[in-house]
Image (tube, helix red, strand yellow):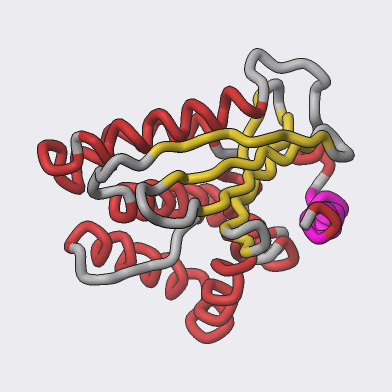
Amino acid sequence: MNRIVMAVMAVLWAALPASAQDAPATTEREPTEVVDTLHTGLLDIMQRANDLGFAGRAETIGPIVKNSFDIEILGASAIGISVWRTWTDDQKQTYEDTFSRFLIANYAYQFDAFSGQNFQVIDNEGGPKETTLVKSHLVRPDKEPVELTYLTRIRKGRVGIIDVYSDGTISEAARRRSEFATIYRDAGFDGLISSIEKQISDLASGITTPESG
């Protein structure tokens, strides 16, 4: 598991422009704190799911997602660094904003009920270039726990999640890349943005069942 994750991270790191690689050595929050904050927010929207509705869950979890993830890096990895680097600054910003709302919508859609679930941080392991793997479980009554491993990194003075591995090996960024790259190849940048916007709308309407980290 760790070897796979680190190999993916090494490729990502080498491809990023220098400005995105800057990683100050100090930060106000530890990786486990970032993951715990995300988990607390997810439990909150699960426990209040019916009262909040989709829009309320998205509004509640949105700021937490933005503060927990390094959305620029996760989004760039989700489309492929070689593609991302060819875009203009305006295209990158449009894509990042759309991807951010897509990520938030996924969490609002997936975490829509509570039946006694809980999150547990199991372990964390340091890696190269200020990366840390935070291993956790989503504990479900009468079911096997779901293993969630968060790949985090310090950049611009803050810790951000740059990928999520479900069941220990299934990368959220890689899963999205297989979809987004095909859409981009066939429909170009505008087609990609339109497709993601439609998926956000479908999530809000409850008419799709996406996979999510």
Decide: is 92 above or below 38.
below
How many discs mark residues in the rendered view? 0
Q: Where is residue 96 in the image (x, y as percent from the top left)?
A: 51, 49
**What main secondary structure does the magenta stretch of the protein show?**
helix
Q: In this view, does 143 lie to the left or right of 85?
A: left
Q: Position of residue 85 (x, y in %)?
A: 72, 59
Q: Residue furthest left?
A: 51
Position of 154 relative to 173 (above/below): above
Q: Residue furthest bottom?
A: 186
Question: Which residue corresponds to the image point at 68% horizontal and 67% vertical from the top-left?
Answer: 83
Most foreground residue, 103 or 156: 103
Is residue 59 rendered to the left or right of residue 86? left
Q: Quadrant of the N terminus?
A: bottom right
Q: Name the residue nearer the viewer: 95 or 114.
A: 114
Q: Seen in the image, is 189 located left or right of residue 199? A: right
Quarter of image, res 84: bottom right
Please state the extent of the stretch shown in magenta in the rendering. Answer: 4-16
Q: Quadrant of residue 63?
A: top left
Asked if the magenta segment contains residue 204, the reply would be no
Is residue 37 depicted above or below 84 in this figure? above
Residue that appears at 46% across and 54% down: 99
Rendered view: 71 above or below 142: above
Left or right, residue 188 beside residue 110: right
Q: Residue at x 60, y 51 (%)?
A: 164
The verdict on residue 14 being magenta is: yes
At 82% from the left edge and 49% from the top edge, which residue is drawn? 13
